[in-house]
Image: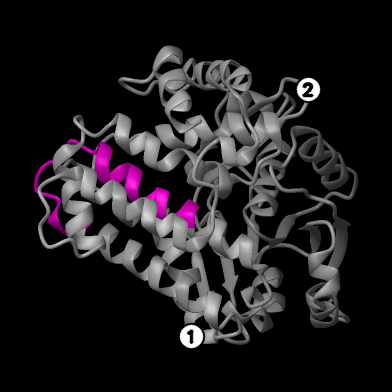
């Protein structure tokens, strides 16, 4: 096990009526609040009304910032920063899925600096402080509601980059699984794929020894994600199943899952960012289309952990061949009805060069051993 510092300062209030704590938590952080949410779902579901009713008469002023889209944009973040500055906001509340959370984090850090927030993402600046953030997740998958990462697409440059910093942790997460019960089927599935990849990438790429706890933690989290997702597809309104799915997706991208693993790499995510930046593909769909090809291209490099993943997660009975694990992963994806190739997403060979170049642009900022533009193109061609 490598030396590590475990830092996870998020207060998580989990369960039914978690939302009822919003007034109390906001009072401790600030009374001028930027409310960040998506395009329609929070209003349509009645959640927006519940929030305004809860805060009515409390002395807390809500400044609304709506319209965050999937694969959130740099231009939207810039608009949110201006809105928060003009209103002298003291704190931020984010209501939605990973895109809303990431946008709110970027606003929380960007509002306190004079430079373009994109300089966090291109590695030229680091975060020194941020406005306090409360998250209210309405979908399971990214884990952004409790972690310190964010991913934004620069709409002018056509680049989708990620960035993480300890100052980006939310202060409070109000997680009521019942708020996720109305998530559409495809979003439920894509969230599961995203969270599974959050488990799988560090599991395979770590070089640390003596990490039995971490491996078992990631294996168990992955099993729970699969079981809960399958259950939610049959019974989407189950509070128990939605609880398991929300909590396990949080844990998949939490610092406890990688503590002691040393440097780990998310090259699969790096590749997918080009797909969703350039082709407006849902993040989970892009990951699904790449996953088995990414595994196949790393079959020899990660032979031992791939085989163990198959044994522990898919109960393959100690199969020595990692190809059996890849077959099991493909079978899972087929059963979930997700795209299995880039061709399924409508891409052609002519599209791949730009996606590989996008990966290369990210690699200028975040070095990943064994991955360059040529290697990225090799994986993309296999996934076609």
Name which residue lies at 20% across and 36% down: 302
Quadrant assignment, res 2? top left
| Residue 187 place in picture, x, y as percent | 62, 61
- The label on residue 240 is 1
Left or right: 319 in relation to 183: left
Check contact, mark 2 vs mark 1: CB within 8 A.
no
Mark 1 is surrounded, within 10 Å at the Cα level, by few (under 14), some (14 to 19) or many (20 or more) other residues, namely few
Q: Can residue 213 be seen in this view?
A: yes
Q: Which of 357 and 297 is in front in this view?
A: 297
Residue 153 in the image: state x and y as whole percent: 68, 33
For the point 54% across and 61% down, the residue is: 189
Q: Give the prevailing secondary structure in the magenta stretch.
A: helix
201 left or right of 186 in image:
left
- The answer to if 105 sits in the magenta stretch is no
Give the residue drawn at x 45%, y 70%: 247
Q: Mark 2 points at which residue?
A: 156
> Which residues make up the magenta segment?
193-215
Residue 40 position (above or below residue 87):
below
> Looking at the image, which is closer to me, 2 or 155?
155
Eyeballing the image, is 11 above or below 281?
below
């Amino acid at each position: 096990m490598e030396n590590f510092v475990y830092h996870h300062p998020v207060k998580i209030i989990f369960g039914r009526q978690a939302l009822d704590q919003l007034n109390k938590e906001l009072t401790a952080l600030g009374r001028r609040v930027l409310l960040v949410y998506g395009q329609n779902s929070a209003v349509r579901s009645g959640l927006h009304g519940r929030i305004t009713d809860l805060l009515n008469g409390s002395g807390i002023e809500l400044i609304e910032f709506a319209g965050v889209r999937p694969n959130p944009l740099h231009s939207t973040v810039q608009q949110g920063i201006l809105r928060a500055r003009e209103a002298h906001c003291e704190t931020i509340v984010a209501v939605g899925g990973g895109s809303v959370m990431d946008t709110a984090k970027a606003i929380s850090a960007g509002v306190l600096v004079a430079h373009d927030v994109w300089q966090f993402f291109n590695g030229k600046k680091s975060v020194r402080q941020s406005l306090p953030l409360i998250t209210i997740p309405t979908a399971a998958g990214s884990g952004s509601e409790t972690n310190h990462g964010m991913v934004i697409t620069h709409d002018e440059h056509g680049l989708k980059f990620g960035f993480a910093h300890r100052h980006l942790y939310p202060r409070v997460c109000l997680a009521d699984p019942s708020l996720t019960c109305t998530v559409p089927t495809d979003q439920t599935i894509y969230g599961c794929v995203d969270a599974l990849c959050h488990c799988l990438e560090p599991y395979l790429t770590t070089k640390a020894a003596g990490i039995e706890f971490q491996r078992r933690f990631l294996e168990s989290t992955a099993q729970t994600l699969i079981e809960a997702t399958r259950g939610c597809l049959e019974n989407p309104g189950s509070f128990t199943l939605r609880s398991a799915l929300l909590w396990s997706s949080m844990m998949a991208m939490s610092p406890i899952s990688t503590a002691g693993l040393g440097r780990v790499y998310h090259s699969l995510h790096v590749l997918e960012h080009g797909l969703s930046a350039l082709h407006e593909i849902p993040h989970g769909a892009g990951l699904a289309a790449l996953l088995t090809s990414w595994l196949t291209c790393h079959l020899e490099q990660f032979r031992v952990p791939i085989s163990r993943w198959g044994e522990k997660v898919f109960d393959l009975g100690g199969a020595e061949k990692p190809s059996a694990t890849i077959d099991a992963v493909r079978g899972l994806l087929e059963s979930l009805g997700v795209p299995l190739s880039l061709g399924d997403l409508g891409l052609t060979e002519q599209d791949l060069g730009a996606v590989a170049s996008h990966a290369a642009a990210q690699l200028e900022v975040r070095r990943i051993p064994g991955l360059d533009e040529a290697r990225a193109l090799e994986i993309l061609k296999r996934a076609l």
